[in-house]
Image (cartoon, grey):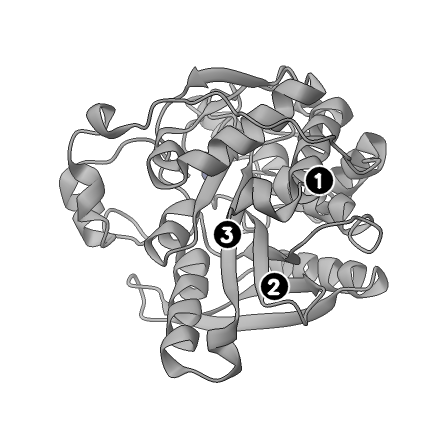
Amino acid sequence: MRGRMHRRRLAMLGLAALSAPLASRVAEARPWQSQPPLRPAPIDGARAYGYLKAICALGRRPAGSAANQRQRQMVAEHFRKLGGQVREQPFTARDPADGRIVRLANLIGSWHPERTERVILCAHYDTRPFADQEFDPIEARKPFLGANDGASGVALLMEIAHHLNELETPWGVDLVLFDAEELVYGQNGEYFLGSKHFAERYRAGRRAGGSGARTTYVAGILLDMVGGKDLRLPREPYSLRYAPRLVDQVWGVARQLRATAFVDQVGREVLDDHLPLNEAGIPTIDIIDFDYPHWHRASDTPEQCSPESLEQVGRVVTAWLSLPRDAVRPR
Ligand SMILES: [Zn+2]
Protein backbone atom coordinates (compact mmCIF):
# COMPACT_ATOMS: atom_id res chain seq x y z
CA MET A 1 0.00 0.00 0.00
CA ARG A 2 1.13 3.53 -0.33
CA GLY A 3 0.27 7.06 0.60
CA ARG A 4 -1.13 9.86 -1.47
CA MET A 5 -0.45 9.74 -5.16
CA HIS A 6 -0.70 12.51 -7.65
CA ARG A 7 -3.74 12.81 -9.88
CA ARG A 8 -2.18 11.13 -12.91
CA ARG A 9 -1.49 7.97 -10.93
CA LEU A 10 -5.02 7.95 -9.54
CA ALA A 11 -6.45 8.39 -13.02
CA MET A 12 -4.34 5.48 -14.27
CA LEU A 13 -5.79 3.36 -11.53
CA GLY A 14 -9.27 4.26 -12.70
CA LEU A 15 -9.83 6.02 -9.41
CA ALA A 16 -9.91 9.56 -10.68
CA ALA A 17 -12.82 10.44 -8.41
CA LEU A 18 -10.50 10.06 -5.46
CA SER A 19 -8.12 12.74 -6.62
CA ALA A 20 -10.43 15.60 -5.58
CA PRO A 21 -9.71 17.13 -2.17
CA LEU A 22 -10.68 14.56 0.38
CA ALA A 23 -10.97 16.37 3.68
CA SER A 24 -14.31 17.95 2.94
CA ARG A 25 -15.80 14.62 2.00
CA VAL A 26 -14.64 12.57 4.97
CA ALA A 27 -17.73 11.48 6.86
CA GLU A 28 -18.21 12.73 10.37
CA ALA A 29 -17.36 9.99 12.84
CA ARG A 30 -20.67 9.14 14.41
CA PRO A 31 -20.91 7.43 17.78
CA TRP A 32 -22.04 3.88 17.38
CA GLN A 33 -25.48 3.67 18.92
CA SER A 34 -26.62 0.15 19.79
CA GLN A 35 -24.64 -1.99 22.21
CA PRO A 36 -25.49 -5.67 21.67
CA PRO A 37 -23.45 -8.14 23.72
CA LEU A 38 -20.18 -8.91 22.00
CA ARG A 39 -18.88 -12.41 21.37
CA PRO A 40 -15.28 -12.26 20.21
CA ALA A 41 -13.73 -15.59 19.25
CA PRO A 42 -11.01 -16.89 21.60
CA ILE A 43 -8.24 -15.69 19.30
CA ASP A 44 -4.84 -17.17 20.16
CA GLY A 45 -2.29 -14.40 19.61
CA ALA A 46 0.69 -16.72 20.16
CA ARG A 47 -0.58 -19.15 17.53
CA ALA A 48 -1.19 -16.27 15.08
CA TYR A 49 2.35 -15.00 15.72
CA GLY A 50 3.63 -18.52 15.05
CA TYR A 51 1.97 -18.37 11.63
CA LEU A 52 3.61 -15.00 11.01
CA LYS A 53 7.03 -16.51 11.73
CA ALA A 54 6.31 -19.57 9.58
CA ILE A 55 5.38 -17.32 6.65
CA CYS A 56 8.54 -15.25 7.07
CA ALA A 57 10.60 -18.46 7.21
CA LEU A 58 9.67 -18.92 3.53
CA GLY A 59 11.86 -15.89 2.81
CA ARG A 60 10.96 -13.02 0.52
CA ARG A 61 7.66 -13.68 -1.24
CA PRO A 62 7.16 -11.28 -4.15
CA ALA A 63 4.35 -11.96 -6.62
CA GLY A 64 5.19 -14.73 -9.07
CA SER A 65 7.99 -16.21 -6.90
CA ALA A 66 8.28 -19.84 -5.80
CA ALA A 67 8.04 -18.78 -2.13
CA ASN A 68 4.84 -16.89 -2.88
CA GLN A 69 3.40 -20.07 -4.41
CA ARG A 70 4.56 -22.18 -1.44
CA GLN A 71 2.82 -19.77 0.90
CA ARG A 72 -0.39 -20.02 -1.10
CA GLN A 73 -0.26 -23.82 -0.93
CA MET A 74 0.44 -23.74 2.80
CA VAL A 75 -2.54 -21.48 3.52
CA ALA A 76 -4.83 -23.44 1.17
CA GLU A 77 -4.06 -26.66 3.04
CA HIS A 78 -4.59 -24.87 6.37
CA PHE A 79 -8.00 -23.51 5.31
CA ARG A 80 -9.06 -26.94 4.00
CA LYS A 81 -8.09 -28.67 7.24
CA LEU A 82 -10.23 -26.19 9.15
CA GLY A 83 -13.33 -26.78 7.04
CA GLY A 84 -12.99 -24.06 4.42
CA GLN A 85 -13.92 -24.61 0.79
CA VAL A 86 -10.82 -23.47 -1.07
CA ARG A 87 -10.33 -22.22 -4.60
CA GLU A 88 -7.69 -20.27 -6.45
CA GLN A 89 -8.50 -17.36 -8.71
CA PRO A 90 -5.64 -17.38 -11.24
CA PHE A 91 -4.77 -14.48 -13.50
CA THR A 92 -1.75 -13.16 -15.36
CA ALA A 93 0.07 -9.90 -15.78
CA ARG A 94 2.72 -8.86 -18.26
CA ASP A 95 6.03 -7.52 -17.04
CA PRO A 96 6.43 -4.35 -19.12
CA ALA A 97 10.22 -4.53 -18.76
CA ASP A 98 10.62 -7.77 -20.73
CA GLY A 99 7.09 -8.71 -21.83
CA ARG A 100 7.24 -11.84 -19.70
CA ILE A 101 3.89 -13.25 -18.54
CA VAL A 102 3.72 -13.52 -14.77
CA ARG A 103 1.31 -16.08 -13.35
CA LEU A 104 -0.54 -14.81 -10.30
CA ALA A 105 -3.41 -16.06 -8.14
CA ASN A 106 -5.72 -14.98 -5.36
CA LEU A 107 -6.70 -17.60 -2.81
CA ILE A 108 -10.24 -17.83 -1.44
CA GLY A 109 -11.33 -19.91 1.56
CA SER A 110 -15.11 -19.97 2.07
CA TRP A 111 -17.10 -20.86 5.15
CA HIS A 112 -20.89 -21.34 4.90
CA PRO A 113 -20.60 -21.40 1.09
CA GLU A 114 -24.38 -21.78 0.72
CA ARG A 115 -25.05 -18.34 2.19
CA THR A 116 -25.62 -15.64 -0.41
CA GLU A 117 -25.00 -12.67 1.90
CA ARG A 118 -21.27 -12.75 2.54
CA VAL A 119 -18.43 -10.77 4.03
CA ILE A 120 -14.84 -10.77 2.86
CA LEU A 121 -11.88 -10.62 5.22
CA CYS A 122 -8.75 -10.06 3.18
CA ALA A 123 -5.04 -9.33 3.11
CA HIS A 124 -2.33 -9.20 0.48
CA TYR A 125 0.18 -12.05 0.64
CA ASP A 126 2.94 -10.88 -1.68
CA THR A 127 5.87 -8.86 -0.39
CA ARG A 128 7.53 -5.81 -1.78
CA PRO A 129 10.29 -6.94 -4.20
CA PHE A 130 12.76 -4.62 -2.47
CA ALA A 131 12.90 -2.43 0.63
CA ASP A 132 12.39 0.91 -1.11
CA GLN A 133 12.19 2.93 2.11
CA GLU A 134 15.56 1.62 3.28
CA PHE A 135 18.19 4.30 2.82
CA ASP A 136 21.12 2.30 4.12
CA PRO A 137 22.44 0.69 0.90
CA ILE A 138 23.69 -2.43 2.69
CA GLU A 139 20.36 -2.96 4.46
CA ALA A 140 18.48 -2.28 1.22
CA ARG A 141 20.15 -5.29 -0.42
CA LYS A 142 18.86 -7.67 2.26
CA PRO A 143 15.78 -9.72 1.35
CA PHE A 144 12.62 -7.90 2.37
CA LEU A 145 10.66 -10.25 4.64
CA GLY A 146 7.50 -8.19 5.13
CA ALA A 147 6.66 -9.54 8.58
CA ASN A 148 4.07 -6.85 9.18
CA ASP A 149 3.56 -5.75 5.56
CA GLY A 150 2.39 -9.04 4.10
CA ALA A 151 2.67 -11.77 6.73
CA SER A 152 0.64 -10.18 9.55
CA GLY A 153 -2.65 -10.02 7.67
CA VAL A 154 -2.29 -13.56 6.33
CA ALA A 155 -1.30 -14.90 9.77
CA LEU A 156 -4.36 -13.34 11.35
CA LEU A 157 -6.65 -14.78 8.66
CA MET A 158 -5.07 -18.20 9.37
CA GLU A 159 -5.88 -17.78 13.07
CA ILE A 160 -9.43 -16.56 12.40
CA ALA A 161 -9.96 -19.68 10.25
CA HIS A 162 -9.75 -21.78 13.43
CA HIS A 163 -12.91 -20.12 14.76
CA LEU A 164 -15.22 -19.87 11.77
CA ASN A 165 -17.03 -23.18 12.29
CA GLU A 166 -17.94 -22.24 15.88
CA LEU A 167 -18.53 -18.54 15.43
CA GLU A 168 -22.17 -17.52 15.24
CA THR A 169 -22.40 -15.12 12.35
CA PRO A 170 -25.26 -14.25 10.03
CA TRP A 171 -22.89 -14.12 7.06
CA GLY A 172 -21.05 -16.44 4.79
CA VAL A 173 -17.36 -15.67 5.27
CA ASP A 174 -14.66 -15.58 2.59
CA LEU A 175 -11.04 -15.30 3.67
CA VAL A 176 -9.19 -13.91 0.66
CA LEU A 177 -5.47 -13.58 0.01
CA PHE A 178 -4.70 -11.04 -2.70
CA ASP A 179 -1.68 -11.49 -4.90
CA ALA A 180 0.35 -8.64 -6.40
CA GLU A 181 -0.62 -5.77 -4.15
CA GLU A 182 3.04 -4.79 -4.09
CA LEU A 183 3.95 -5.74 -7.64
CA VAL A 184 6.10 -2.88 -8.79
CA TYR A 185 6.90 -2.37 -12.44
CA GLY A 186 8.83 0.87 -12.38
CA GLN A 187 7.27 4.28 -12.78
CA ASN A 188 4.23 3.21 -14.74
CA GLY A 189 3.58 -0.01 -12.93
CA GLU A 190 0.20 -1.07 -11.73
CA TYR A 191 -0.70 -1.86 -8.17
CA PHE A 192 -3.23 -4.06 -6.39
CA LEU A 193 -3.67 -6.43 -9.33
CA GLY A 194 -5.17 -9.17 -7.15
CA SER A 195 -7.93 -7.08 -5.61
CA LYS A 196 -8.65 -5.51 -9.00
CA HIS A 197 -9.03 -8.95 -10.53
CA PHE A 198 -11.25 -10.11 -7.66
CA ALA A 199 -13.44 -7.00 -8.04
CA GLU A 200 -13.72 -7.51 -11.82
CA ARG A 201 -14.75 -11.12 -11.37
CA TYR A 202 -17.36 -10.12 -8.80
CA ARG A 203 -18.81 -7.47 -11.07
CA ALA A 204 -18.79 -9.81 -14.07
CA GLY A 205 -20.49 -12.55 -12.05
CA ARG A 206 -23.27 -10.22 -11.01
CA ARG A 207 -23.75 -8.98 -14.58
CA ALA A 208 -23.83 -12.49 -16.02
CA GLY A 209 -26.64 -13.70 -13.76
CA GLY A 210 -26.81 -17.31 -12.59
CA SER A 211 -25.12 -18.43 -9.38
CA GLY A 212 -22.57 -15.61 -9.45
CA ALA A 213 -25.30 -13.01 -9.32
CA ARG A 214 -26.76 -14.48 -6.15
CA THR A 215 -23.73 -13.64 -4.02
CA THR A 216 -23.73 -10.22 -2.41
CA TYR A 217 -20.79 -9.02 -0.39
CA VAL A 218 -22.31 -6.86 2.32
CA ALA A 219 -18.96 -5.78 3.75
CA GLY A 220 -15.22 -6.17 3.47
CA ILE A 221 -12.42 -5.81 6.00
CA LEU A 222 -8.85 -5.48 4.76
CA LEU A 223 -6.08 -6.32 7.24
CA ASP A 224 -2.77 -4.69 6.41
CA MET A 225 0.09 -4.18 8.88
CA VAL A 226 -1.93 -5.33 11.89
CA GLY A 227 0.88 -7.10 13.77
CA GLY A 228 3.36 -4.38 14.69
CA LYS A 229 4.43 -3.67 18.26
CA ASP A 230 2.90 -0.41 19.51
CA LEU A 231 0.04 -0.97 17.08
CA ARG A 232 -1.96 2.16 16.35
CA LEU A 233 -5.05 2.03 14.17
CA PRO A 234 -6.72 5.35 13.39
CA ARG A 235 -9.73 5.48 11.05
CA GLU A 236 -8.51 5.49 7.46
CA PRO A 237 -10.00 8.30 5.32
CA TYR A 238 -10.97 6.32 2.19
CA SER A 239 -12.66 3.77 4.45
CA LEU A 240 -14.55 6.62 6.09
CA ARG A 241 -15.62 7.96 2.75
CA TYR A 242 -16.76 4.67 1.21
CA ALA A 243 -17.93 2.69 4.24
CA PRO A 244 -18.52 5.08 7.16
CA ARG A 245 -21.05 2.85 8.90
CA LEU A 246 -18.69 -0.11 8.82
CA VAL A 247 -15.90 2.02 10.29
CA ASP A 248 -18.26 3.11 13.08
CA GLN A 249 -19.28 -0.48 13.77
CA VAL A 250 -15.73 -1.82 13.94
CA TRP A 251 -14.28 1.05 15.98
CA GLY A 252 -17.40 0.87 18.20
CA VAL A 253 -16.76 -2.83 18.83
CA ALA A 254 -13.12 -2.01 19.59
CA ARG A 255 -14.15 0.61 22.13
CA GLN A 256 -16.49 -1.85 23.86
CA LEU A 257 -13.73 -4.49 23.94
CA ARG A 258 -11.16 -1.93 25.14
CA ALA A 259 -9.00 -2.76 22.16
CA THR A 260 -6.87 0.32 22.64
CA ALA A 261 -4.91 0.00 19.38
CA PHE A 262 -8.03 1.30 17.63
CA VAL A 263 -7.96 5.06 18.18
CA ASP A 264 -10.83 7.44 17.50
CA GLN A 265 -8.83 9.68 15.21
CA VAL A 266 -8.66 10.04 11.45
CA GLY A 267 -5.35 8.75 10.10
CA ARG A 268 -3.61 9.23 6.78
CA GLU A 269 -5.26 8.08 3.57
CA VAL A 270 -3.83 4.89 2.10
CA LEU A 271 -4.14 3.54 -1.44
CA ASP A 272 -4.66 -0.13 -0.85
CA ASP A 273 -6.67 -3.22 -1.84
CA HIS A 274 -9.85 -1.78 -0.32
CA LEU A 275 -10.22 0.74 -3.17
CA PRO A 276 -10.99 -1.71 -6.03
CA LEU A 277 -13.47 -3.54 -3.76
CA ASN A 278 -15.25 -0.30 -2.89
CA GLU A 279 -15.35 0.66 -6.56
CA ALA A 280 -17.08 -2.68 -7.21
CA GLY A 281 -19.74 -1.87 -4.63
CA ILE A 282 -18.38 -3.80 -1.65
CA PRO A 283 -18.18 -1.40 1.34
CA THR A 284 -14.67 -2.18 2.56
CA ILE A 285 -12.50 -0.70 5.28
CA ASP A 286 -8.74 -0.85 5.69
CA ILE A 287 -7.50 -1.69 9.18
CA ILE A 288 -3.93 -0.47 8.86
CA ASP A 289 -1.08 0.93 10.95
CA PHE A 290 0.41 3.17 8.33
CA ASP A 291 2.83 4.75 10.80
CA TYR A 292 4.67 1.46 11.33
CA PRO A 293 8.32 2.63 11.49
CA HIS A 294 9.68 -0.39 9.55
CA TRP A 295 7.37 0.03 6.55
CA HIS A 296 9.20 -1.10 3.37
CA ARG A 297 12.45 -1.39 5.28
CA ALA A 298 14.73 -4.39 5.73
CA SER A 299 13.89 -4.18 9.45
CA ASP A 300 10.26 -5.32 8.91
CA THR A 301 10.99 -8.64 10.65
CA PRO A 302 9.05 -10.82 13.14
CA GLU A 303 10.86 -9.15 16.08
CA GLN A 304 8.98 -5.93 15.28
CA CYS A 305 5.62 -7.70 15.59
CA SER A 306 3.71 -8.97 18.61
CA PRO A 307 1.17 -11.68 19.46
CA GLU A 308 -0.87 -9.16 21.48
CA SER A 309 -1.40 -6.89 18.47
CA LEU A 310 -2.66 -9.75 16.31
CA GLU A 311 -4.90 -10.98 19.12
CA GLN A 312 -6.47 -7.58 19.66
CA VAL A 313 -7.37 -7.13 15.99
CA GLY A 314 -8.63 -10.72 15.74
CA ARG A 315 -10.95 -10.22 18.70
CA VAL A 316 -12.41 -7.05 17.24
CA VAL A 317 -12.94 -8.56 13.78
CA THR A 318 -14.60 -11.74 15.08
CA ALA A 319 -16.78 -9.77 17.53
CA TRP A 320 -17.92 -7.62 14.61
CA LEU A 321 -18.60 -10.78 12.55
CA SER A 322 -20.89 -12.11 15.26
CA LEU A 323 -22.99 -8.96 15.57
CA PRO A 324 -26.64 -9.55 14.79
CA ARG A 325 -27.54 -9.01 11.17
CA ASP A 326 -29.59 -5.86 11.75
CA ALA A 327 -26.74 -4.15 13.62
CA VAL A 328 -24.66 -4.39 10.45
CA ARG A 329 -27.19 -4.16 7.67
CA PRO A 330 -30.64 -2.91 8.67
CA ARG A 331 -33.37 -4.27 6.41
ZN1 LIG B 1 3.77 -2.57 1.32
In this rendering, does residue 9 appear at all?
A: no
Which comes sooner in the sequence, label 1 or label 2?
A: 2
Bin the neighbour count of mark 3 within 10 Å (Cα to Cα): few under 14, some 14-19, many 20 and up.
few
Q: Which residue is labeled 1 in the image?
A: 318
Of the residues shown, which amino acid type is indicated by label 3?
Arg
Q: Is residue 53 left or right of residue 260?
A: right
Residue at 76 percent of width and 60 percent of height: 79
Residue at 57 percent of width and 54 percent of height: 120
Q: Is residue 299 left or right of residue 192?
A: right
Percent x, y for residue 131? 47, 34
Name the residue nearer the viewer: 239 or 231.
239
Q: Which residue is labeled 3 in the image?
A: 331
Label 1 SS: helix
Percent x, y for residue 50? 81, 38
Q: Tell me the distance, in whole angstroms, between the alpha carbons under discs 1 and 2.
A: 20 Å
Q: Nearer the viewer, mark 1 or mark 2?
A: 1
